[in-house]
Image (spheres, rainbow, N blue to C red):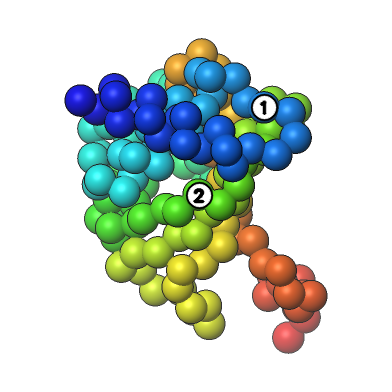
Amino acid sequence: MIAKQVVRLAMDITSLCAGPAPSAEELAVVAEFVRATNAGELASLQALFAADAQVNDQLRNFWGLDEIAAWLAAEIVGERVELRLLRIRKHYDAIIAAAEISGEFEAARTAQPMAVDLHFTVQGTKIVRLLVLLARDDALEPDIRRVP
């Protein structure tokens, strides 16, 4: 049943692709990440990552399955994160998924849903790197660059 959902979702997200198309395997991994995130399935999410994977979520690094599993449990499943894909593009070895993200988390000075870019690097059927970056369309300078 889940496999059919993933195939259907992968086919659906193909219509969101711009530029060079990700491979079928890459699309299936991204589709399964979105499906498992929205379903709150911790074990399914953990199974997507390689043993030595890296996640960088807003400048915080998580290395290896133990750290990533803790991050997934607390900040993805624990905060009931939901993703709505808007667009997908391949850029060299990265699959960049533009999405709206919402959940039970506090987002200082930001209304939900928030725009994010999810940068996936996939090897075979595993995520080896995931970067989660806020995406803004406005011209304001990011807080991190402001001098008090």
> Which residue appears farthest toward the top when viewing the image?
124
Q: Is residue 58 visible?
A: no
Q: Which residue is mark 2?
A: 85
Q: Which residue is mark 1?
A: 21
Residue drawn at x 56%, y 62% is: 115
Residue drawn at x 63%, y 37% is: 17
Q: Amino acid at mark 2?
A: Leu
Does residue 53 appear left or right of residue 39 in this picture?
Answer: right
Q: Is residue 133 visible?
A: yes
Q: Nearer the viewer, residue 144 or 82?
A: 82
What x and y, as percent, mark residue 144?
69, 70
Q: Earlier in the sequence, mark 2 or mark 1?
A: 1
Q: Quadrant of the C terminus?
A: bottom right
The local secondary structure at tag 1 comes to loop
Tell me where residue 44 sits by quadrant: top left
What x and y, as percent, mark residue 65?
37, 30
Q: Are marks 2 and 1 in contact (CB under 8 Å)?
A: no
Q: Nearer the viewer, residue 116 or 9?
A: 9
Does residue 51 appear left or right of residue 36 in this picture?
Answer: right
- Relative to 72, is 144 above or below? below
